[in-house]
Amino acid sequence: MNRRLLLVLALLLLLAVPASAAEGIPGDADGDGVLARAEYASAVLAYLDTACMGGTGDLDRDDIRDAAWVYARWDGKPREVVDSSGQTVTLYRPLRRVVTFSGESLETLRSLGFDMDRVVAVDKYSHEKSIFFPECREKANVGSIWSPDMEKVLSVRPDTVILYATISTAACDDIQRRLEASSPGIRVLRFDCFKPATYAGEIRTIASIIDETERGEEFASFYGSTMDRIRDGTADIPDDEKTRVYFEYWFDYTTVAASAGYNEKTELAGGKNPFATGTTEYPVVDPEAIIVADPEVVVKLAGQGLAAGGYAGHDPEALAAIRSTLFERPGWSRISAVEDGRVYVIHSDILGGAQHFIGTAYLAKWFYPDRFADLDPHAVHQRYLTEFQGIDFDLASQGTFVYP
Amino acid sequence: MMGLPANRLFCLVLLFLFVPAAVCGAPVTRTLSTAEPGAGEVFTVSLSIDGIALGGVVETLPAGYAFAGTDHPDDRVLVRGEKIGFAVMNDTRITYSVTAPASGSGDITGTWEDFLGESHGQIAPSHVAVDGIETAVASGGESPAAQQAGSPLAVVAAAAALLIAGRGGRR
């Protein structure tokens, strides 16, 4: 039994390193790391000879297509990129067989017009999002970073695997170590694609990797215009005049502290979180403390831990019901936010991942309706889906992301 | 029996079916200086290339016909028997010469590859016959399984359809 298992694993390892993952530019005959014109021409003839003229050679169709890509788009030289974990990765070929363990990176690839047929496997969460990622239904499911299906990863013979850069680093480091040990040619790239501080840079880096720099600039500009509008619109608000916000996580009386991404977005939108100080990311707060803090705005998060709305269903009533329960909490009628009706529900789909700029725009508008009267998060969202994600999703009749 | 309007409609349908296949879609087309060379005559084959920045073309000559040279750079040409390979690097036209045998007919066939566009296909065959005399000599090239460009049959069908349509219109 053990011998059989070892045999299967050995076979998988053999399969795991596709020809395209080997280091070096295909056709670089002298191995100097540059594909010169003469080398490229010679490689083409060698390929044609093998493929159509009865000759024998090593280059297959993917090899010569990759050589053409490098010759035409990278000036015959390998491309060096520094990913968000700080590692320098040298690319000798374009990305042809990609596995993503990060839905945010997958979404960013799609924003940049990457050929999604080249994504051969995705994480289980992206696999489950059949409405948002309809093209991933038939792709291999490699599990999550906490429970990766390494055999599945190797079986799809990736040349590139994308992992998170700065979250769950232990789990991602472990996956990277295992991949590099079993398949030295595999390129492991680390990106977050959900952090306001680094996302614009990541867009440009990934665009450079897939040679979509123009599209990258267009998308980074679209993203940046919304984020800059928010930053500029809140820059001159004195700290003591900022809107007091109680941001409640999926679970009742659980808020977000300074280290949480949701707090970063709350503060970006000009909100002041009275519970930001704390060591835990999502602290449970004393209900009385919320009443004492008297927030001017309450934001309740819906999503995975409080399933309602999002891309999966058009259900405004469900979000309305969540909001109603907040109004009924003991003592909350004394809270300014409740008195003024400034209690909102937002779905994590547009605040937690690559779409955080949409959710942050809603927060800014809720916190400062006069300052952001001209900001239309709904329109930003629809443009993102139609123009950058390229999915047929009409926000007027599909999905529910905020209430009211 | 179809009435005139129906007849014309049928012919127009034929046109729509065949003409696009005959004239559109193929990034590489071939023209010959003559399809009926004399014995031992050297004739010219021109390949017109549209939209392939980096790619390749392999031409296959009929048996007895021999490659006689090209204006394409030497380091981008490979000859193996009746097959000639060309590396395409932003070229829009490749011209090569062929020496006809003492007798014989057949098809010049070809394939193209667009490496950046990641596509490939067949070039429509071109028939040649020494002095226009058909012989039983088989073509040196394989018969393409599926031609992306239209076949001469399609062109003939389209021309016939045009003729019938034109006649129908005058009645």
Image: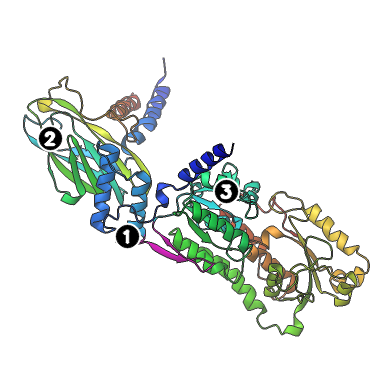
Write down the chain letter for disc 3.
A
Is A85 contained in the magenta span?
A: yes
Q: Nearer the viewer, residue B12 or B122?
A: B122
**Can residue B66 be seen here?**
yes
Binning the other alpha carbons within 10 Å of mark 2 as few (below 14), some (14 to 19) or many (20 upward) gives some
Residue at disc 1, secondary structure: loop
State left or right for residue A81 relative to residue A317: left
Quarter containing the C terminus of chain A: bottom right
Write down the chain letter for disc 2.
B
Binning the other alpha carbons within 10 Å of mark 3 as few (below 14), some (14 to 19) or many (20 upward) gives few
Residue drawn where x is 73% and y is 50% of the image: A314
Count of picture labels:
3
Which circle, 1 or 2, is nearer the viewer? Answer: 1
Q: Nearer the viewer, residue A292 or A297?
A: A292
Residue A167 at x, y = what percent? 63, 64
Q: Which residue is mark 3?
A: A150
**Can residue A135 be seen here?**
no
Q: Is residue B88 above or below residue A220?
A: above
Q: Amino acid at mark 1?
A: Gly
Q: Which residue is mark 2?
A: B66
- Marks 3/2: CA–CA distance: 55 Å
Q: Which residues are magenta?
A: A74-92
State left or right for residue A214 relative to residue A287: left
- The circle drawn on residue A76 is 1
Q: Amino acid at mark 2?
A: Ala
Q: Amino acid at mark 3?
A: Met
Q: Residue furthest top?
A: B1
State left or right for residue A396 relative to residue A212: right
Residue at disc 2, secondary structure: strand
Confirm or deny contact between disc 1 and disc 2 (CB under 8 A): no
